[in-house]
Image (spheres, grey):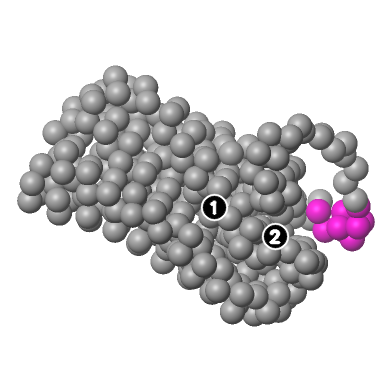
C-alpha cells in the first residue's frame, strides 16, 4: 500500500493534502463517535480468531495490492521515461520590494524564486499554512484551556513553522549550484544574512496572522508574541548555526511528500534546542513565578539574541567558512 500511495503522490505537488484530509476525516468520525473504528477493527480481529478461515480476506487484499503494485512498477520499467525532459513555462514575479534590503536583495530574490519554482521548496509554503492552523488542534479543546504552560510550545511552532522547515536545510537548498555560488566574489555574511532576514520576516508575518487566536484568550496572544520574539532572537541563530553541519545534497525537482533526501542527524537533533529548550525555560519560570513571568523570560532571551545579532552572525559566518570546502565536496556527491 505504501508503494502505491508513493507512486500516485509523486504526480502532484499537494499529494500529502488528500492523505491528511482522509486520515483526519477518519479520526473525526471516530472521535465524535459517528463511526467507531476501534470497535470495527476489534470485531474484525475477534472474528478471524474465532473463525480462522476469515484470514483469507486480508490475504486476498494483500495479493490484490501486490498485483496492482507490480503492474504500476512494470509500467514505469523503461528507459525513455528517465530521459524525458519537462518543458514548462517559467512564471516571473515582481520582487522589486526586496531592493529595500540593499546588498542582501539578490540573495533574497534567489531564495524566493527557488521556493516558488521547485517542488521540494514549494512544500514549505503549504506546511506554513498547515502550521498556522496548528493551534486549532489544541485551543478549542477545554482540556488544554487548563494547561496554559502548553501555549508557549504551540506559539513557538505556529510562528516558527517556516523557520524550522526552510532553515533546517540551509544551505542544502543551494546544493545544486553551491560550488558556483561560492566561486563568485560575494560576502558570505551577506548570503547568510539574507537567509536570516527571510526567516525573521516569516516569523513576523505568521505572528500577525495568528493574532485571531486571541479569541481563545489573551494569554494565547501573549504566548505567541513572546514565542515570536524568541524565534527571531534565538531560534533563527540556532538553526543557522546548525546548517553549517549539513552535508547532504537536495534535489529540488523531486516531490516533497515522503521525501527524506537531505535529512541527516542535524535535522533530528536541531529540534531539541528549537522546541524543547524554550518550552523548558517557559515551564520553569511559569512553575516558580507566574504565566506572565514565563512569557517575559522567553521575550527577554529573544531580545538579547536580537541585541547580539551582529556578534552571533560573525560567529556563524566563521563556522560556515570553516565548513565551506567540506560542504562543496559533500554537495558534489550523489547521496
Residue 174 is tagged as: 2
Label 1 sits on a secondary structure element that is: helix
**Mark 1, residue position:** 196
The span shown in magenta is 76-84
Q: Looking at the picture, does residue 5 appear above or below residue 144?
A: below
Label 2 sits on a secondary structure element that is: helix
Residue 89 among those drawn in magenta: no
Which residue shows up at 15% across the image and 40% down it? 291
Q: Quadrant of the C terminus?
A: bottom right
Residue 79 among those drawn in magenta: yes
Residue 123, picture quadrant: top right
Residue 192, picture quadrant: bottom right
Please give left or right for residue 31 compared with residue 57 in the image. Answer: left
Q: Which class describes the residues within 10 Å of circle 1: few (<14), some (14-19), or many (20+)?
A: many
Which residue shows up at 58% across the image and 55% down it? 193
Residue 47 is tagged as: none
Rendering coords of residue 152 (x, y %): 27, 43
Residue 114 visible to the viewer:
no
Badge 1 or badge 2: first in the primary sequence: 2
Which residue shows up at 66% across the image and 50% down it? 104
Label 1 with label 2: CB-CB less than 8 Å: no
Amino acid at each position: 500500500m505504501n508503494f502505491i500511495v508513493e507512486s500516485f503522490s509523486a504526480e502532484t505537488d499537494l499529494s500529502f493534502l488528500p492523505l491528511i484530509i482522509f486520515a483526519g476525516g477518519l479520526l473525526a468520525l471516530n472521535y465524535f463517535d459517528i463511526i467507531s473504528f476501534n470497535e470495527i477493527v476489534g470485531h474484525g480481529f475477534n472474528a478471524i480468531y474465532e473463525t480462522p478461515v476469515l484470514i483469507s480476506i486480508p490475504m486476498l487484499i494483500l495479493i490484490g495490492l501486490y498485483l496492482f503494485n507490480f503492474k504500476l512498477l512494470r509500467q514505469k520499467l523503461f528507459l525513455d521515461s528517465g530521459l524525458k525532459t519537462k518543458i514548462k513555462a517559467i512564471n516571473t514575479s515582481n520582487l522589486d520590494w526586496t531592493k529595500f534590503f540593499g546588498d542582501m536583495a539578490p540573495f533574497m530574490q534567489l531564495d524566493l524564486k527557488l521556493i516558488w519554482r521547485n517542488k521540494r521548496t514549494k512544500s514549505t509554503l503549504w506546511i506554513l499554512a498547515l502550521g498556522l492552523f496548528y493551534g486549532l488542534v489544541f485551543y478549542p479543546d477545554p482540556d488544554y484551556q487548563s494547561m496554559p504552560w502548553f501555549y508557549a510550545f504551540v506559539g513557538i511552532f505556529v510562528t516558527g513553522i517556516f523557520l524550522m522547515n526552510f532553515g533546517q536545510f540551509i544551505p542544502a537548498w543551494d546544493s545544486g549550484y553551491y560550488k558556483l555560488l561560492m566561486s563568485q566574489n560575494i560576502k558570505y555574511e551577506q548570503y547568510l544574512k539574507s537567509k536570516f532576514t527571510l526567516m525573521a520576516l516569516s516569523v513576523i508575518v505568521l505572528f500577525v496572522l495568528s493574532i485571531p487566536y486571541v479569541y481563545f484568550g489573551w494569554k494565547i496572544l501573549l504566548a505567541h508574541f513572546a514565542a515570536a520574539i524568541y524565534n527571531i532572537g534565538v531560534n533563527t541563530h540556532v538553526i543557522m548555526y546548525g546548517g553549517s553541519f549539513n552535508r547532504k545534497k537536495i534535489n529540488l525537482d523531486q516531490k516533497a511528500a515522503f521525501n527524506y533526501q537531505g535529512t541527516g542527524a542535524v535535522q533530528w537533533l536541531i529540534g531539541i534546542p528549537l522546541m524543547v529548550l524554550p518550552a523548558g525555560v517557559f515551564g520553569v519560570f511559569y512553575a516558580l513565578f507566574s504565566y506572565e513571568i514565563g512569557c517575559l523570560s522567553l521575550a527577554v532571551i529573544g531580545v538579547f539574541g536580537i541585541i547580539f545579532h551582529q556578534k552571533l552572525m560573525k560567529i556563524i559566518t566563521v563556522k560556515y567558512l570553516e565548513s565551506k570546502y567540506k560542504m562543496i565536496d559533500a554537495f558534489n556527491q550523489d547521496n
